[in-house]
Image (spheres, coloured by chain):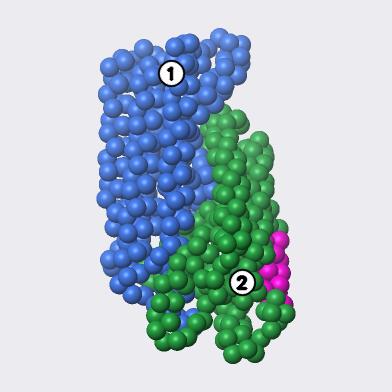
Chain colours: A blue, B green
Amino acid sequence: MGTSDQIRESCFYQEWMNLQEEELTELNRAISLNANGGASDAELTRLIEKIMDHFQDYVQRRNLMARADVSPYFAPTWCTSLERSVLWIGGCRPSSFVRLIYALCGAEIESHLSEFLRGVRIGHLGELSGRQIYMVDELQSKTIREERKLCTRLAGLQENVLDHPLASIAVTTMGRSCQVSDNLEDALDKHGRAMAEILGEADQLRLNTLREVIGILTPRQAVEFLAAGKKLRLCMQDWGKKRDLDHGRNSGN
Amino acid sequence: MGTSDQIRESCFYQEWMNLQEEELTELNRAISLNANGGASDAELTRLIEKIMDHFQDYVQRRNLMARADVSPYFAPTWCTSLERSVLWIGGCRPSSFVRLIYALCGAEIESHLSEFLRGVRIGHLGELSGRQIYMVDELQSKTIREERKLCTRLAGLQENVLDHPLASIAVTTMGRSCQVSDNLEDALDKHGRAMAEILGEADQLRLNTLREVIGILTPRQAVEFLAAGKKLRLCMQDWGKKRDLDHGRNSGN
């Protein structure tokens, strides 16, 4: 494989985080414009579609890279400790997209109190209709069911790694030496392919869940939701870097 | 916290892996002696107890360290990518101890064929009684139930991290800046303490499960089981280092 894998993975991630910064700037600009009546629903929808295309492209490229070697994606060294501690199969929990809507509704409702006092309204996520709330609830149940299925499959895979031929290779070779045979390499490669497949399915579930969330929201709500999600993602990285620094650790690149 | 956390964590782990090497040597010596009639059951039992005491001590010390900052334990940078990819709440799955017995029984049964041809018998793990197999099966079901409970609690915690006040802090501050307030630090500390608690319970489940496995096995079976487990653990590290090297990655320290 050569010495370029680690650099490529880390750069790929850094590019993705930079893109998140750019998208957040675009989203914030659109939100401001929209508040002043300067951005139509069609324009907002184009921005949302562009962002979703980026996400799909990221998932596809990551999938190709993970097929070559999946193991770093389950606990990436390029993230901070804080980010790694909330990781679920190489990324955020798909249900966290839905959870964020609930959190934002709460935040919106709270902040409306002070906004009303100032006579200004900025958010639209506190204005979910009964029908939207019903659809969000349905999506949350479905997503959690899908997460559990993937979790169970991952558990099976992690347990299988102990089975033949790994256990017998480790045990039947004498003394301390850990023989590396074709048999072992095949077993580890096969395990890696199965793990890459699960990662791919988790990424697909993240993508599909986000698509469904966007489908439930109006364009104005969706840009606010995407901006909040990206802001939170970038903040987690910032907070993680600060905490790693406080604890004398090297953060992700 | 100062700059010593990362070094302390990495050294603590390295010491633990060195101890695994030493214990494996002692176990292999005991197995050889026992095969020649030179080690009594009482001597084997003393060795097993010493090893279990080491494990308990490790769990206690790790728990104290994780209370200061838990996040690195969920995806330790001091492990190889391969080791991280099979990690479950900061360590091996507790059920993997039981799974290893099943794998070893199979391996023993297979290797007996060739041993019979040579007229030699070395293993005792292929000779589990019906009563022992029943107890192992019972333990496996119980352990998987306990694992699922911890998994569900971890999922809840990972989801909660998105709730107040994190989401509202990320969203209500304007622009890109990720404000670090006392409120945020409190929320992250509280989340960390809850994660440390789950890690402690997972460690305790690993310890209890291993104790129960040892309790089911005879001393001769137990030393073979422990030797196989430690050998497999050390081999995973060796194989992981080799694979990280092949992919041009820096392995754990």
Dominant secondary structure, magenta: helix
State the residue at coordinates (31%, 32%): A52
SS category of the residue bearing label 1: helix
Give the residue at x 27% y 50%.
A64
Mark 1: amino acid: Met
Residue bearing mark 1: A135
Q: Is residue B225 above or below residue A86?
A: below
In this view, the residue in front, B161 or B97, is: B97
Q: Is mark 2 on a helix, strand or loop?
A: helix
Any part of residue B18 in sight: no
Please tell me which residue is depicted at 47% across the width and 50% down the height of the picture: A155
Chain of the residue that carries numbered disc 2 in the rendered image: B
Look at the picture and state if B226 lies above or below A151.
Answer: below
Q: Return the residue nearer the eye: B44 or B19.
A: B44
Q: Give the range drawn in magenta.
A: B46-60
For disc 2, the marked residue is B222
- On the picture, is B156 further left or further right than A172? right
Towards the viewer: B45 or A100: B45
Residue B182 visible (yes or no): yes
